Image (cartoon, rainbow, N blue to C red):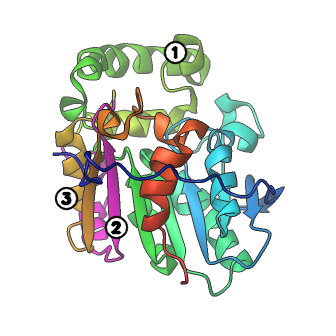
Amino acid sequence: MSAALANPVFPPAPVPALAPAAPAFSEFLRGAPDGLPLALRDFRPRGPARGAVLVAPAMGVAQRFYEPLATFLAAAGLRVITFDYRGIGASRLRRLADEPADIMTWAELDAATALAALAERAPGLPITWLGHSLGGQIIPFVPGHERIAKAVLVATGSGYWRTLSRPLRRRAPLLWYGLVPTLIPLFGYFPGRRFGVVGDVPGNAMRQWRAACLHPDYLAGIVPGAYERYAAFTRPLTSIALTDDEMMSDAGITALYDRYAAAPRRLVRLDPAELDVPRIGHFGFFKKEMQAPLWQAHLLPELAQHA
């Protein structure tokens, strides 16, 4: 079922473009609790901010991918921080074969560091956690996540391989039983970029992801105490699913959404045909051309901000 949209007989008027003045932007390093410096970007509105947003990336995706959206949100009056997990993008500060991080490292150290940085730089502002795929799966494992006012998940579902989209489900056994067990011992990490799969990822992170994707309960089934952590999350949450997502099926989206059972929540399914865009998919939500049909119309109203 698609999200409730404007009456198609009387479509909404075109959304005017925001003022062209670019928001302030800076890059900085911040030490994680174990001392490792992480790369972050800070997008600041020209005037007083009404809210703050932390953009938590998908698996293997560098923060620069989210720059158009972060720039748009800052121009709309929001303080935004993006970041790279260690071993990814600008936080790849050593040979990937020497990077021991797994997914829980990314959640417990890296995402927590970025969240703390945003809270310090945007005191008193309501914080929205904007998680893309993996970035929406790890919230309960992030120390200090209680300080967020709301979570918005985009293209976020269970990675259990039997609930993936049909095309991806057919290829999953090759990835999990062939490529991952073979390539990590050879390279010391997962060299996904050269195979067009996920991207280059630390070996331990890929091993942990493999274990999760082979378990019916995904991360909840392999991380001690995970069931309780998901059940304890009570902040308002909106999950935005795309009907043409080439990775996530409805079953996968619903499975992860239901983990957040104690949260006041709603699930929104967006159909590109109803939005008059040719395609969105798993990554298209964050592309610049989605400013009017998605960011302005469907994302901004979901973000926590002062009136």
Looking at this view, name the residue that lies furthest to the bottom.
124
| Residue nearest the observer in this picture, 162 or 246 | 246
CB atoms of marks 3 and 1 within 8 Å: no
Q: In this view, does 267 lie above or below 67?
A: below
Q: What stretch is highlighted in magenta?
A: 216-245
Horizontal and vertical percent for residue 200?
A: 59, 26
Amino acid marked by disc 2: Leu
Q: Quadrant of the C terminus?
A: bottom right
Residue under numbered circle 2: 237
Marks 2/3: CA distance? 11 Å
Q: Residues within 10 Å of mark 2 (few under 14, many from 20)?
A: many
Amino acid marked by disc 1: Gly
Task: Give yes or no for residue 301 being in the magenta stretch.
Answer: no
Residue under numbered circle 1: 196
Q: In this view, does 55 lie above or below 281?
A: below
Q: In this view, does 288 lie above or below 115?
A: above
Q: Quadrant of the N terminus?
A: top left
Marks 1/2: CA distance? 32 Å
Looking at this view, name the residue that lies furthest to the front.
10
Amino acid marked by disc 3: Asp
Residue under numbered circle 3: 258
